Image (cartoon, grey):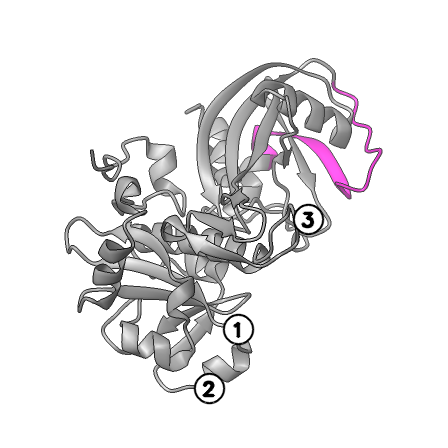
Amino acid sequence: MTAHAAEPIHDPMTAEMSFTANTLDRQAVQRSDTAYLQDLLEGPAARIVLSTPTKLILPDNTGETIGHQLDAALAVGADRREMVFLGVEPSTAKPYFATTIDRDDDEIAAMPGLKVIDLRTLALRAELPPSDLGILAQARALIHWHRTHRFCSRCGQPSKMAEGGYRRDCGSCGGHHFPRTDPCVIMLITDGERALLGRPPRLPEGIFTTLAGFMEPGETIEDAVRRETLEESGIRVGKVTLISDQPWPFPANLMLGCLGEALSFDIDIEDDELEACRWCDRAEVRQMIDGTHPDGDIIPPSISIAHHLITGWLERRL
């Protein structure tokens, strides 16, 4: 039985977010067939997504959008042995692969026909089709994992790619290692007509957003929302509702977007996760969105699930 690409997305919130429209048929059952993958890679339709350790390498003025032909990828320094199979695009039958080039960003950018850019900037510019951003998100997460897991975590010996890049095998101890996706809860906590927004120090000045944090082992989504909110703001949360989710390839997270109902209301920032946190009524949130806030405060851009949680609450769509 062959795995097929997911059906088109119909959830309005999910469809508006970046990185959610990956249409590739990942062909999981066939990934162990090395001859099949080699034929796809050597075929004229194959396209390779390239990346430096920090940024994507895209074709510039070649008629392609996100992928390179195999000979062009090899010329830049791609390694055939470290090609991750992403899947086949159903409408064009193009197979997509991805790999990392261990060269300096400036060196790559100086080469003719290439441009170097980070994925977040690409998403903010909204110049690529949503399906291309989905492919790039998958590629970025996978090649980051391979770049940072080249040695066996059991014995420390070098590992090699297997299953089309969805496993690394250790020839020394026999260990199998699989790509990881780290689930994060991201939550808008509400008190009727008010929403709890915070400012982590890592964000640009003036941006207020939802609270968020990594899930811990043995924890439900609801418990993670309650724990993280309490740790960051001192607010206790009761009912939690899962609203939507979003792949977030920075480097390999799955954001679980939730609404939570506050049980307490006095904010107490005790750790260094936030530099500011406050309750905002609907009028203030509207000012943040419209760009009319007296202090210049704004919410995150529309590429993120946080934006859609906030605007969905403001417009009473959640």
Cα–Cα span, label 2 and label 3? 41 Å
In the rendered view of the protein, which quadrant contains the C terminus?
Answer: top left
Residue topped by disc 2: 110
Looking at the image, do the residues carrying marks 3 and 1 touch, with CB atoms under 8 Å apart? no
To which residue does mark 3 refer? 295
Residue 77 falls in which quadrant of the image? bottom left
Q: Is residue 92 left or right of residue 95?
A: left
Nearer the camera: disc 1 or disc 2: 1
Q: Position of residue 17 (x, y in %)?
A: 40, 43
Q: Residue at x 28, y 40 (%)?
A: 29
Q: Given the image, on which type of amino acid does mark 1 rest?
A: Asp
> Magenta span has 32?
no
What is the three-letter code of the residue carrying label 2?
Ala
- Mark number, residue 186: none
Residue 36 seen by the camera = yes
In this view of the protein, which residue sits in the foreground, 286 or 184? 184
Nearer to us in this view, 234 or 33: 33
Out of 216 and 125, give the one closest to the viewer: 216
Placement of the N terminus among the 4 image quadrants: top left
Label 2, secondary structure: give it: loop
Q: Residue furthest front?
A: 172
Residue 268 relative to residue 116: left or right? right
Residue placed under numbered mark 1 in the picture: 102
Task: Give the mark count.
Answer: 3
Counting other residues with Cα less than 10 Å from the Cα at mark 3, is it few (<14), some (14-19), or many (20 or more)? few
Q: Position of residue 285 (x, y in %)?
A: 57, 36
What's the magenta region? 265-284
> Which mark's residue is nearer the viewer, 2 or 3?
2
Label 3 sits on what residue type?
Answer: Asp
Are the residues tagged 2 and 3 within 8 Å (C-beta)? no
Label 2, residues with CA under 10 Å away: few <14, some 14-19, many ≥20: few
Q: Which comes sooner in the sequence, label 1 or label 2?
A: 1
